[in-house]
Image: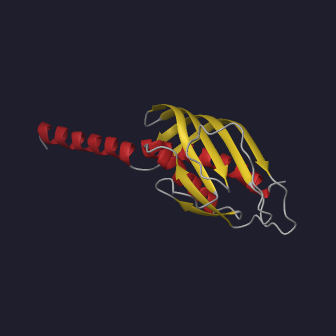
Amino acid sequence: MNLSKRLKIIFLLLAAAVLAFVFMDFHLAKSVTNTDTNSSRANTQIPADYQPWGTALYIVPAQNDPLTRTMAEAIYQKAKDSEYFSPILMESMPQNGPYPILLVGVTGNRYFWTPFFAKSSLTIQYAFSNFETLTSLDGPKTVMLRNDGEQPAIHADGEVVQRDQSFGLISLAGYRGLVCDLAARTIIKDLELTIQAK
């Protein structure tokens, strides 16, 4: 085999490896993750027959960027695994309901990625309401809860700041999916407590 054929094969193998690490979805690495959560919730009086299981949850990305969309999809997947939710992933905010709505957005992110080491810091904001349309994550600080007597009016909002470092074999898509999955788990746990309205 002559030198030019060898170089061509080496070049093709390198190009295939680069494409795999950028576009394929895999994560064979050890991760160290720290998460800080700041959330608030409020609800009206709980009717005696209130059952929170199987609550419909309309998940809406707050902005149209790839990371926020990936985050909304990760929350949808985690909500499907929860006994408390029957999630529906929306493309955009519906007009005048339906409720309850979860509005979510990645409002800050820093990424450093290589195929063998990745580091990130994400800030995710979310807002939940089962009685009013949410149009922005920068909503009013004071919320008036309405009580129809059949179910409690529930409102919640929060911010998750997550820092991660991963070592191993990591594709770019796999790393993005990993950090969104970890943050989604935190948000769904908080929402489960929210709709229990204790």
Q: Residue furthest right?
A: 48
Residue at horizontal 71%, vertical 49%?
155
Camera sees residue 171:
no
Q: Where is residue 61 shown, x and y percent of the image?
A: 51, 49
Q: Where is residue 134 shown, x and y percent of the image?
A: 59, 48
Nearer to the camera, 118 or 87: 87
User: Across the whole image, how many numbered discs are drawn on residues?
Assistant: 0
Q: Where is residue 194 shown, x and y percent of the image?
A: 75, 52
Residue at horizontal 54%, vertical 42%?
105
Q: Quadrant of the C terminus?
A: bottom right
Q: Where is residue 190 shown, x and y percent of the image?
A: 72, 48
Nearer to the camera, 182 or 145: 145
Can you tell which quarter of the image residue 122 is in? top right
Residue at horizontal 54%, vertical 35%?
107
Camera sees residue 112:
yes
Can you tell which quarter of the image residue 10 is in? top left
Compared across the picture, whether 3 is left or right of 18 comes to left
Q: How did the renderer colour the structure?
A: secondary structure
Q: Quadrant of the N terminus?
A: top left
